[in-house]
Image: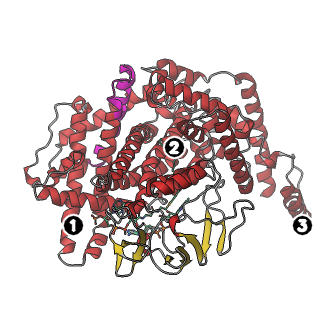
Amino acid sequence: QTDQTSLSLSLSLSLSLSLSLSLSLSLSHIMNPDLKAERAGASFDPKALTPHLYGGQARLERFNAVRRLIEEDPVFRVDDYYFASREERYTRAMEKTSRLVQLVKQHNLSEEESIVMRLCIREQLPLGLHWVMFIPAIKGQGTPEQQKKWLPLAQSLRIVGTYAQTEMGHGTFLRGLETTATYDPATKQFVLHMSDHGPHAFIVQIRDLDSHKPLPGVSVGDIGPKLGYDSMDNGFLKLDHVRIPRDQMLMKFAQDPKPSPVWIHVWSPERPDDFAQVSESGAYTRPPNTKLSYGTMIYVRSVMISDAARHLQAATTIAIRYGVVRRQSLLEETASKETQVLDYNSSQQQLFPLLGWAYACHFAGQHLIKMYQDLQASLNRADLSMLEYVHGTTTGLKALVTTIASEGLETCRKACGGHGYSRFSGLPDFYQDYVPACTYEGENNVMKLQCARYLVKCFRQAAKGRNLAPEMSYIGQATKPSHTSKPLNLDGPDAWLHWKIQSRVLEAKACLSLAAAVRELDRQLGSTSKGKAWNNAAEPLSAAALEHSQVVMLRLLEGGIATPSIADTARRALESLRSLLALKLIQAQAPALQLANLLSAMDVQHLSTAVTKLLAVVRRDAVALVDAFDLSDHFLNSALGRYDGQVYEALYAAAQKSTLNATPVTRAVQEHLQPLMKFSRAMLGMPKL
Ligand SMILES: CCCCCCCCCCCCCCCCCCCCCC(=O)SCCNC(=O)CCNC(=O)[C@H](O)C(C)(C)COP(=O)(O)OP(=O)(O)OC[C@H]1O[C@@H](n2cnc3c(N)ncnc32)[C@H](O)[C@@H]1OP(=O)(O)O
Ligand SMILES: Cc1cc2nc3c(=O)[nH]c(=O)nc-3n(C[C@H](O)[C@H](O)[C@H](O)COP(=O)(O)OP(=O)(O)OC[C@H]3O[C@@H](n4cnc5c(N)ncnc54)[C@H](O)[C@@H]3O)c2cc1C
């Protein structure tokens, strides 16, 4: 059996080898003809859309100039990416970080340009958290004096920080954290130790600035291999009675409005649900909102929407380009050519809504960053009115889009068939580095329930006739009796293409879910405690949070498309994509909508016809829509997603680098398989082949 296997494998290997060689000879440096035809046949020019996505022509040009700095520098090459060990990945990532900082200085780049530069690097950088959490924590949580002291040090990398909040025993439940900070008035120091309860933010020096060795009382190290994130040294940290000066507690929101004395944030056993504040002499007072110290998490949840966009853009670019290059099977037996896999309805049903989500996340990401900036500005004016809304919105969107992007990356991998499983497709690595987003910065089940908590609150306010924030006012419908609803009774499939109809139905469905969740919650509350009632109603509550978040995302997509600077041809293509996404969401809920008398049987039939029509419209522009993202081959690092579509040539060339191909016969075969086969032949004899 082993003999036969090795025989047939070597036969097929030599066969594919000669085929691939001839492909590479005849096709190198030529655009794949199918991809060329797609580009020629699109209804709009992606070059007209790209500047809009990058914030205008001038910003796009700056982006490209920065991107060239990365892609033309050998330190950032990606050809070693798929073969490096974890330690090599980590070391190379650190080398890239160091070069990145040199380039920023050398070219005198702005903060925005340095962010762009980080986004162009096809690697997770170990200092990512320094930029995404440590610096934002100082900005968001530090007093002006603390910012003045720490920000210049952090921004110039004289110090490098992390965000060590999660403990072995607690990640979600922040009120359950067990590290204590005990204030010692005699020395005006906090003593940090692992033993009790309480959430606060402190700057703690953990390593010597010169030797980089851990300081006394600090145990720190890498947590070991993970599903992905090979280039990151995610760490453990243990503090044993570590002393830090009092002013290293981030206490922007824990300050007494009166100028002195300085107030400090400390957990109090009398109010375990709460932060308290304590003065130098030990007097307590409440902060304006106990959740203000969670602000850095709100920031990261906001930027994570853009991160989901980037990953979905990459995955759909790879799968859609490959989908037009890859031909497999015959749709019609009489056809002269095999079918492009993107022409299969099942591929379109899966990939095109994801393309819609990629655009939705793009526009929503921009909106959320702005929303966070507005929140910060209002908090700086001691106005807390936005906090609840922003928390409710970001938790729901974080849960929705990280789930869609994670599942979407896997869908794109499967859409690429067997070659999608190769790491050279780029998709496995994007997936394994992205998927922890469902867990970090608030586990998604927990985030959905936080969003639901806000929705239930809005529902109860609306039921009392109170006004809601304009973005939430549609929830008022949820409180109305459902027996009054009437079906749409649309006069044909094209009526489904109107945004007003789509948003009306999506909102109606979200209201239906919210009303059902509140009914279930109230039913539970009638017979059990509040905690148990919420737990028992978790499923409908989570569904309501997701459907509300879909409404928000679709509105932001529509808002992004409606901006006047987009060329009309591109806008029409995007409108079709938005319609397809909205209608696919509605289609998934059609039975419930019919049951609630919101859609008639004919509405559902028209819906199905409209979806089929839209698939064909989006199919025509699918390549143009992913080309508009303008992701480079360097960033995609994908044999399947290349701009020129030379996928087989690239796969073959990449395979040559496998260390198993360094010698014609591997060491493993020489040391283990050959002796085994020799033994089998000696024992059983060998007929002539
Ligand atoms: C120039 C532009 C720049 C652009 C840049 C563009 C960049 C582009 C992209 C660049 C790439 C970036 C990629 C990102 C990579 C990131 C890597 C990150 C790595 C991972 C890091 C981490 O992973 S780091 C740890 C995160 N760890 C959590 O995330 C814990 C979750 N756990 C909780 O967050 C709390 O534990 C939880 C559950 C709320 C309960 O908190 P709790 O028990 O205290 O509170 P309760 O549930 O009792 O709620 C009581 C009331 O508080 C209200 N409330 C609760 N939270 C609130 C809040 N935040 N704000 C307001 N209100 C809040 C709630 O709504 C209730 O309100 P009410 O009473 O009125 O109903
Ligand atoms: C790659 C990666 C990087 C990270 N980086 C950092 C970092 O830099 N700094 C940092 O501080 N932390 C970091 N974390 C930790 C991360 O924030 C936590 O893992 C996350 O908040 C979830 O907490 P947990 O691990 O305690 O999960 P748990 O809370 O133990 O969750 C386990 C299960 O219990 C469920 N569950 C828990 N509580 C509830 C509830 N109230 N209601 C319903 N279900 C519940 C969850 O849904 C989940 O299914 C990182 C994690 C990962 C994966």
The answer to whether marks 1 and 2 mark residues whose Cβ atoms lie closer than 8 Å is: no
Check the image and name the residue furthest to the front.
260
Residue 576 belongs to the span the image colors magenta: yes
Q: Residue at x 48, y 56 (%)?
A: 145
Determine the secondary structure under disc 3.
Answer: helix
Measured as percent of width and height from the top left, residue 523 is found at 18, 71
Which numbered marker is on residue 683?
3
Say which quarter of the image contains residue 460: bottom left
Residue 130 position within the rendered picture, expressed as x and y whole percent measured from the top left:
58, 53
- Asked whether residue 294 appears in the rendered view, the answer is yes
Asked if 29 appears above or below 435 in the picture, the reply is above
Rendered position, 482 above or below 207: above
Tell me which corner region of the image, top left, top right, bottom left or bottom right, holds residue 105: top right
Which comes sooner in the sequence, label 1 or label 2?
A: 2
Q: Amino acid at mark 1?
A: Glu
Position of residue 512 measured from the top left corner of the image (x, y, whole percent)? 20, 54
In the rendered view, tell whether residue 250 sits above or below residue 636: below
Q: Earlier in the sequence, mark 3 or mark 2?
A: 2
Q: Nearer the viewer, residue 297 or 567?
A: 297
Q: Mark 3 or mark 1, which has the lower sequence index?
A: 1
Decide: few, some or many residues near mark 1? Use Cα within 10 Å; few <14, some 14-19, many ≥20. Answer: many
Q: Which mark is residue 113?
A: none
**Label placed on residue 311:** 2
Q: Which mark is residue 520?
A: 1
Disc 3 residue crowd, few under 14, some 14–19, many 20+, Cα 10 Å: few
State the residue in front, 529 or 59.
59
The mark lying in front, picked from 1 and 2, is 2
Residues in magenta, as a range: 560-589
Q: Residue at x 85, y 46 (%)?
A: 662
